[in-house]
Image: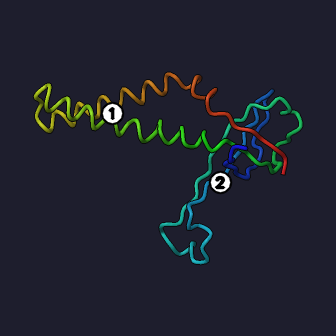
Amino acid sequence: MEDLINHRGIVERVDGNLVSVKIVQHSACSSCKVASMCSSAESKEKIVDVMASNASEFKKGEEVMVYAGLSTGRTAVIIAFVIPLIIMVVWLVVAMKVLGLSELSAIGSDLMVLGVYYVLLGLNRKKLNRRFMFYIAKT
């Protein structure tokens, strides 16, 4: 069975088959006893939209568990960090060695190419939403 990434959350909204769940994402050290006095301990609230055929079973304010497959997390890391790093390194080499741009021009064009990558990701948001499936269960 595939390992799961799970988070506890609170149902924020139910709209048809869509359940919006607020999860609090904690850093690894936020559970430390002195985390309140440490500047590196942080937490962030995020809203996760989950398509559920049984959405009518969930009510606003209810505590739930949101699940995603471990492969979903790996894919997200690859798309958000690994591919952009590869694009930046390859384009920097191409811009300097093949196109003969100066270092400053190559870096500037590198940032523009990276911007195009993220715009393309944004334009393909619906396709990505189908790939990254989340599941919901009552606690």
> At 47% across and 39% down in the image, what residue appears?
78
Rounded to the nearest angstrom, the CA distance separating label 2 from label 1 is: 32 Å
Whether residue 52 sits left or right of residue 75 in the image: it is right
Q: Secondary structure at mark 2?
A: strand
Furthest toward the right, the residue is 57
Instruction: Assess disc 2: are there few (<14), some (14-19) or many (≥20) residues with their C-alpha within 10 Å of its C-alpha.
Output: some
Instruction: Assess disc 1: are there few (<14), some (14-19) or many (≥20) residues with their C-alpha within 10 Å of its C-alpha.
Output: some
> At 74% across and 38% down in the image, what residue appears?
135
Whether residue 86 sits left or right of residue 76 in the image: it is left
Furthest toward the front, the residue is 1
Question: Looking at numbered disc 2 in the image, what kind of residue is underneath it?
Answer: Val
Q: Is residue 63 above or below residue 16?
A: below
Question: Looking at numbered disc 1 in the image, what kind of residue is underneath it?
Answer: Ile
Whether residue 3 sits left or right of residue 112 in the image: it is right
* Image location of residue 7, percent across then percent down: 70, 51
Q: Secondary structure at mark 1?
A: helix
State the residue position of label 1: 87
- Which of the two residues, 71 or 59, is positioned nearer the viewer here? 71
Whether residue 57 sits left or right of residue 31 in the image: it is right
> At 61% across and 77% down in the image, what residue appears?
33
Instruction: Say whether disc 2 or disc 1 marks the residue closer to the N-terminus.
Output: 2
Task: Give the quarter of the image for residue 13.
Answer: top right
Figure quadrant of the N terminus: top right
- Which of the two residues, 101 or 63, is positioned nearer the viewer here? 101
Colour convention: rainbow
Q: What is the number of the mark on residue 24? A: 2
> At 15% across and 38% down in the image, what residue appears?
104
How many marks are shown on the rendered structure?
2
Q: Is residue 35 above or below residue 139?
A: below
* Image location of residue 100, percent across then percent down: 10, 28
- Which of the two residues, 72 or 138, is positioned nearer the viewer here? 72
